[in-house]
Image (spheres, rainbow, N blue to C red):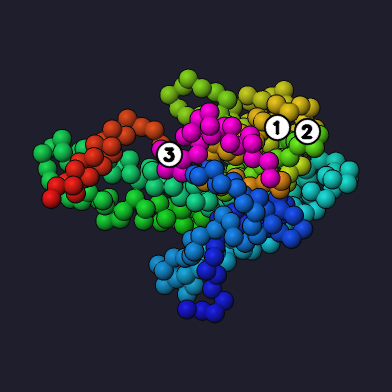
Amino acid sequence: MAKDEVKNQHYVPQAYLRHFANSKEQIWVFDKSNGQEFQTNVRNVASERRFYDNDDLGSITGDRQFIEKQLGNLEGHYETLSQALVRDLSRGRFRSISPKYRHFLATYMVVQMLRTKESRIQHEHMAKTILAIQKKAYRDRGLEIPSDTELLDGTTPKEMAQDVQHRTLLDGDHIREMAMILYRHIWVIQEAFGDEEFITSDHPFVKRGHITGTWRSMSGIASEGIEILFPLSPKYLLTLVERRHFATMARLDGLRMPLVCHDNMIYNNQFQVKQSNRFVFSRNKDFDFVRMMIAEEPIHGDPNRNRLKTNHDSELEADAAKTKAQQDVP
């Protein structure tokens, strides 16, 4: 093992989290799974041991931490640029988002969307759905299921999810295409109302689709009516909206917009609670809003909630019940 290997690997960078921490790099954390809150250093949150290590990639590049180191380079650039942007905003020197900032932030946000634990879990849930379909196809034909836990390629849903995430993070062309989609949206920097603050989470890139009732989810980053929210700091939040549905907002493109009431803050902060995996982060200790949301809709506090509701969920539930029943037989 190389001496310079990184063991504790962040899926939300410390460079990003420092904007929500105090001068000692301490950040307040709310654990949605048990309702506990605590303060800790940014190095201790939104991370997992060897999260990006890849032995197959190591055999090709000679470095199994190739992904972790590439992400580290991006984080260094983000730290410099984001500090300058927030400083200009806070000192009244900001005029509009320059093409340079816009291009880099678009790329950074795409990578942040792809790299989190929540993103990996979403891939895993998709793989589990594929596994359920696979089992049903074998049963419908009266065939013996080759494996209860593996896909046809011999991988488990968890292994497939890790592989998909790693491959996606290495696909530079795909990342550039996605970044260009974000680049073309309308960009507005929202300024927090009064003394209130924006929160963030272990999955800070969040989305809301404004068009419903169609056969498609309309929640992709290129979907008509999509709104994307990305907190930059407790005081500033970057909002991207699709141009056709939000045509009236074109005059605000690239500008700062102060929020005018408490309800605006509730609207923006709610998505960090709903779409995060397990942890919500704040510069202050006020998590009353988070507690209220979870009390009203407990599903938002469940890290094991179903991310992908499909018609095959009953297959998963039936298989799980069958497996448990078999295990309970003495």
Compare marks 3 and 1 and give the one earlier in the sequence: 1
Residue identifier under label 3 = 305
Residue for point 68% across, 62% down: 76
**Distance from the alpha carbon under mark 2 to that under mark 1:** 7 Å
Question: On the picture, is 178 further left or further right than 284?
Answer: left
Helix, strand or loop at label 2? It is loop
Mark 3 Cα-neighbour bin, 10 Å: few <14, some 14–19, many ≥20: few
Q: Is residue 188 above or below residue 33?
A: above
Residue identifier under label 2 = 193
Residue for point 26% across, 56% down: 154
Mark 1 Cα-neighbour bin, 10 Å: few <14, some 14–19, many ≥20: some
The circle drawn on residue 265 is: 1
Residue for point 52% across, 69% down: 7
Compare marks 2 and 3 and give the one earlier in the sequence: 2
Question: On the picture, is 105 further left or further right than 33?
Answer: right
Question: On the picture, is 310 further left or further right than 240?
Answer: left
Question: On the picture, is 220 further left or further right than 186?
Answer: left
Residue 270 is a magenta residue: no
Residue 169 at x, y percent in the picture: 51, 55
Compare marks 2 and 1 and give the one earlier in the sequence: 2
Residue for point 58% across, 36% down: 291
